Image: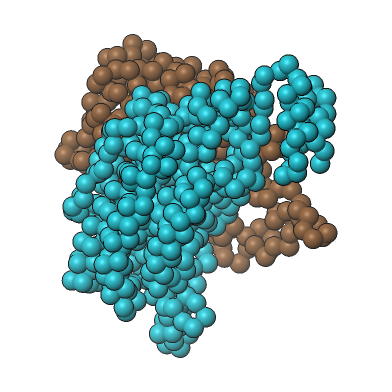
Amino acid sequence: MTTTGQETAEGKVFNVAGQDWDEVVQGVGDGDDERLVVNMGPQHPSTHGVLRLVLTLDGETVTEARVGIGYLHTGIEKNMEFRTWTQGTTFCTRMDYLAPIFNETAYCLGVERLLGITDQVPERAQIIRVMMMELNRISSHLVAIATFGLELGATTVMLNGFIEREYTLDIFELVTGLRMNMAYVRPGGVAQDLPPGALEKIREYLERMPKRIKQMRKLLDANPVYLARTKDIAYLDLTGCMALGITGPVLRASGLPWDLRKSQPYCGYETYEFDVPTQDTCDVYGRYLVRMQEMEESLKIIEQCVDRLGSVRGPVMVEDKKVGWPAQLAIGADGMGNSPAHIAHIMGTSMEALIHHFKLVTEGFRVPAGQAYAAVESPRGELGVHVVSDGGTRPYRAHFRDPSFTNLQATAAMSEGGMVADVIAAVASLDPVMGGVDR
Amino acid sequence: MSDEKKPQQPPAQTADQAADRLPAHKAADRREQPIARTGMFGAGTTGDTSGYGGLVIRQSPKVSSPRPFGGYFDEVSDHLERQFPEFADAIERIVVDRGEMTLYVSRRHLLEVARTLRDSPELRFELCTGVSGVHYPKDTGAELHAVYHLLSMTHNRRIRLEVTCPDEDPHIPSVVSVYPTNDWHERETYDFFGIVFDGHPALTRIEMPDDWVGHPQRKDYPLGGIPVEYRGAEIPPPDERRSYV
């Protein structure tokens, strides 16, 4: 690392790494070039993951913002073509790692549409899916607000957000065996029914969360420092949102109550009572408010789910034995696996059940050829999945339209012409998750 | 097959119903189709003990759905036909399957069709949720497909556009001028499939490194593709490793 400027074709280049900046400032001051190109990221604490921003600055004003992505590309879509349809959930859950349940559900809705079994998914499985999605929405929004606080320098917000997220993850751990990347939602239903004590734990959560959300709102809603950093910052109106394909809280903060849960319901969302919060400020503060209100609405939905799960019994996997996972899974001392009863059945009493299990688990089920598009309202907007089948046991192609990927395109529109410090607020208000962006 | 039932069908239908609605394949049509796969279990290394080794599975013939399509699909198609004079030229065929409508658009007309779909008040597909590439190496003359999903928030409708181009001439016009949101989506499809979107403002790789060779999500590109160095040892790509399949 050197602080003396190197002459290159593009101009003078300085590499700075936390040492004495006097020389750099001196060097920049000497030049007659007012334009300064600053590289932020890909490893920068406030670029929200491995995101690279190339900013052209004129003083403190950003004249050009470019976004570089791809540092977290893991080839999930390609990998899914080499695994069975069911194994696909294990891959796609890892895309947007803050909203794994949404990735799984979108994918499974696509596969179910290809199979034509959308109506056959048991009611209990749909209720569990909705409940898990809304819990996930809360945990994702909490991280959005927590990291947002951190990026603006408010560690209290960060700590509070992450503490509350832990309580959500505890529920995930109890229900699925894992805190993240659960692969819980499967084509045809969910991997297993709720364990004993889950509903009680969620009821406790429902008692605790409203108070905690209120506390966080007290901390932020009218905080003058927070308002100064968020009000009228990173303005993007409805026209901009539509042109750039922005969905989710950013779109709803520009006044359009577009929410797929209301407009194109799936998993039975039309039977739940909840509102779609909107703001018309088109700024960072509006997006924050939308997220906060959405968490409160999610709590309402979870409460309705818990009430229904108390009375709605039945299977959580589609009845069709050619599609439904043969085993009921159970959480043992060493994690989640086939239930002991099922093992005893296939290994001890029924050869046919063993063959069936073996065929369905190793080879997988066949999906009629064709293509389907399914979309869910993820915490960040429309998460769409385009699945193509050639009639085989593996996806011919699975493409995910991740909302983070699309929304991140708005970075330039939101931050050009603003101050360099507001770029951080702009990116954080989009809440991109790079795992989803790069897939 | 059950033609009388069609008008009552709502767009949300099951797959087997959709299969009924598509015209039946004639045996002669099927035999002309390219071979999709042979054998049954994908095993090529050992002798055939299954008896299915000689099985030949051909691709489905390219069918188009007969009118009426049901739901709002007829309305969309009628409006487009009225608004877009070259409809017969531009729309190669229409498939309604699994409650979704696919318009196969010729690439010459893609931009105009997209513009009509966006601007006409009766259609108003104001949101494009990106482009997804699909590679069909056996589909001679149309190996690369670009699939666009359009959403009309005004009318709460969805349709799909599918555009094809041959491998030798992988060019499709860019729709960024109509849907700016497709900027990154087209870059991604170029990156992974090698489809060149003519008229894109800056068609460069987006996910893979700039100097990457090949387009990884094509079917002729193996999984992994390159050896990986890990702690000094070189790990071969998955397709060159020992395999029991």
Q: Work out which residue is located at the far bottom of the displayed protein and give it.
A: A348
Residue A248 visible to an observer of this rendering: no
Above or below A21: residue B110: above
Colour in which chain B is shown? brown
Task: Decide if residue A362 is on the left or right side of residue A260.
Answer: right
* Camera-nearest residue between A347 and B25: A347
Percent across and percent down for residue A73 are 61, 46
Task: Decide if residue B230 is on the left or right side of residue B187.
Answer: right
Which of the 4 image quadrants contains residue A214?
Answer: bottom left
Q: Work out which residue is located at the far top of the displayed protein and give it.
A: B85
* Camera-nearest residue between B20 and A33: A33
Which of the 4 image quadrants contains residue A53?
Answer: top right
Which chain is assigned cyan?
A
Percent across and percent down for residue A45 are 59, 48
Q: What residue is rendered at 50% in x and 77% in y?
A: A335
Percent across and percent down for residue A128 are 30, 64
Percent across and percent down for residue B133 are 52, 36
Q: What residue is rendered at 66% in x and 21% in y?
A: A35
Q: What residue is rendered at 51% in x and 23% in y?
A: A417
Above or below A11: residue A429: below
Q: What residue is rendered at 34% in x and 38% in y?
A: A286
Which of the 4 image quadrants contains residue A130?
Answer: bottom left
